[in-house]
Amino acid sequence: MQNSKIYLDHNATSKLLPEVASIMNELAIRSLANPSSPHWAGREARNLLEDSRDNLAHYLGVKPREIFFTSGGSESNNSVIRQSLMTSEKKHLISSSIEHPSILETCQIVANQQNIEFTELSVDSSGRISTEELLAAIRPETFLISVMSANNETGNIQPIEELSKISYEKNILFHTDLVQSFCKINFDLSKINVDYASASAHKIGGPCGIGLLYVKDKSPFHSLISGGKQERVRRAGTENVILAVGFSKAVEWFSSNQSGLRKKFIQFRKKIFETISKHDEVFINTNLENSLPHTLNFGIRGISAESLLISLDIDGIAISTGSACSSGSLEASPVLLAMGISHSDAKSSLRISFGWSTTKKEIDYFCERLTHHIFRIKKK
């Protein structure tokens, strides 16, 4: 496979599914109307939009009116966190040290307001939040708890049902970022105490530029983007029907193929684990017993992640360290540091993530080239 390109960075974004590309191209050729227009063309677009909403709501076990479309996970997350800005009353937010920046940085920004305080929960060595620490952090003015369902760098899964139950019993709003776990593990939101949930299409082979936000009936919500009546006055702006249909199609495909994909991902991860376990000084940052099966975060002590990433990139293999700052230089992951991993180990850590397009042949080639570069770098 020397001349082929191999993509193993699906946690960043996944390739567009052929089935999704096909239906989106078909709709693009039809030049759909504005779904808010009252004529036949507008009604046709509206029907497609609402069918897509219905499909997404059905998958999550919720009512269609509880789902609205956004530009993606970051907007959905911001929309929830910034609810705290809608009053001058004293408010307290709780989240964790391993959240996506669209949660963590937004919490830090809103906490600059005099009436808002923010508590950042720590995690243990497996990246898990303690229910005891959450209980201890809750105050009378605690307004919202936001915890991701699974981490985008390690794949480690949080005890969302336990955490949300605490939130419900304390009469506190609860939000979970489903972006990385959406369609990888099942969530029936009607059966757990969640007020808000975020998801995005491009992590599952859907199009970039569209996500959703679930807002449970009777949970408070103020629009982040105003100036129109779209999305039940929750988000102004003309809806992108083509992206919505693509999102729905991707969820339909993933839910139909979830079992087979899971088995395949487990086999891929096992193969890589067996390969790296042959080397001295290997360490695993992913909790293999409680994580998304398509993700593996690991490192080899004494070898920088940057060296391996560049070497594999020359071979045509795309992987990630899980964190890259805007300048393009590779930094130690705040997520790994929060888990108590040393700075040097964090700088040696790589993230491999599979998707619908990943093949056994690609994994075999990756393992071959990874082994080659480990031995080559060690000899220097």
Image (cartoon, rainbow, N blue to C red):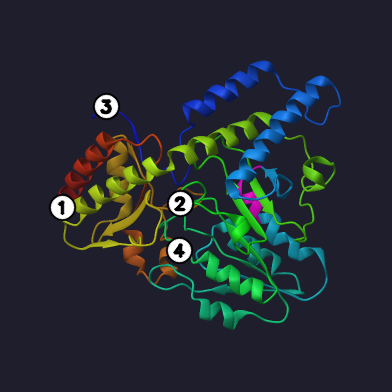
* Vertical placement of residue 2 versus 235, above or below: above
Residue at x 18%, y 47% (from the top left corner)? 371
Residue at x 71%, y 50% (from the top left corner)? 66
2 or 4: tag closer to the N-terminus:
2
Residue in front for this viewpoint, 126 or 336? 126
Residue at x 59%, y 25% (from the top left corner)? 24
Which residue is under mark 3? Answer: 3
Which residue is under mark 1? Answer: 380
Question: What element does badge 1 sit on?
Answer: loop
Which residue is under mark 2? Answer: 324
Which residue is under mark 4? Answer: 335
Amino acid beneath label 3: Asn
- As measured in the structure, the alpha-carbon distance from the residue carrying label 4 to the one carrying label 3 is 34 Å
- As measured in the structure, the alpha-carbon distance from the residue carrying label 2 to the one carrying label 1 is 26 Å
Question: What element does badge 2 sit on?
Answer: loop
Residue 273 in picture, x, y percent from top left: 24, 53
Question: What element does badge 3 sit on?
Answer: loop
- As measured in the structure, the alpha-carbon distance from the residue carrying label 1 to the one carrying label 3 is 26 Å
Please say whether residue 170 is visible from this viewpoint: yes
Residues at marks 4 and 1 touching, judged by CB atoms closer than 8 Å: no
Q: Mark 1 against mark 3, which lies toward the viewer?
A: 3
4 or 1: tag closer to the N-terminus:
4
Question: Which range of residues does the magenta coloring cover?
Answer: 71-77
Please say whether residue 240 is visible from this viewpoint: no
- As measured in the structure, the alpha-carbon distance from the residue carrying label 2 to the one carrying label 4 is 12 Å
Question: Which secondary structure is most common in the magenta stretch?
Answer: helix
Label 3 environment density (alpha carbons within 10 Å; few <14, some 14–19, many ≥20): few
Residues at marks 2 and 4 touching, judged by CB atoms closer than 8 Å: no
Residue at the extreme left of the image, as rendered: 379
Residue 322 in picture, x, y percent from top left: 42, 53
